[in-house]
Image (cartoon, grey):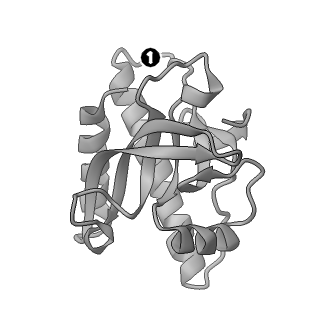
Amino acid sequence: MGDRPVCSTLARLATSLDRDLVVSSFDYTARVGDGIEHPERAVLMARSAWGSQTGSTRLGIGLGQSVTPDPHSLLRRPFCGIYAADQDVLDRLREFCGPSTEPWYPWAQWEYLSLDPPDEQPDLLRHYAAAIAEHARLTWAAQTARGSGRQQPAMRQNRTFDSRQNSASSGSAR
């Protein structure tokens, strides 16, 4: 999936939520529990203070995907989630969000992006970008509400986010 539609859609969402939110896109290395590494790309919405000097975001909400995406491979499907590059922050987020049945570094939580084509949307990239933005909006609202003491359901782990229904449906682990 191309970065440009996702970046611009997340940037519009960031502007509507908070003036201090920025969007970044960068490569990183993901690791599964057994230590196997996978080169991936992230497009994240985050507070400006959560960035590093190199321009990558240390903590954010958004898209992750393999640098060689393949919708037929579970390891290479795009997903949405909460990213934390620092291990201590990742550990605290996992405690806050709940345990994961499939921990992937550096994602505290994640859900596959549903790749089912929409019924009436000729531009698939815009559709998927809108799905990622909706997921980020819901996650941002849920996590900021949890942090303020108002309880809202947090994002479920290891599931597929279906933008057509604005809900998560069961999916397989990455």
Give me the residue at 72% from left, 34% from top. 171
Residue reaching furthest to the bottom: 149
Give the residue at mark 1: 120
Residue 31 in percent (x, y) is at 58, 46
Residue 75 in percent (x, y) is at 60, 29
The quadrant where residue 47 appears: bottom left
The quadrant where residue 162 appears: top right
Give me the residue at 45% from left, 53% from top. 136
Q: Is residue 139 left or right of residue 27?
A: right
Q: Quadrant of the C terminus?
A: top right
Residue 26 in percent (x, y) is at 30, 45
Question: In the depicted view, which residue is nearer to us: 142 or 171?
Answer: 171
Q: Is residue 117 left or right of residue 15?
A: right
The quadrant where residue 41 appears: top left
Q: Is residue 164 above or below residue 102?
A: above
Q: SS for tag 1?
A: loop
Q: What residue type is disc 1 on?
A: Glu
Q: Is residue 74 above or below residue 34?
A: above
Question: In the depicted view, which residue is nearer to us: 112 or 120?
Answer: 112
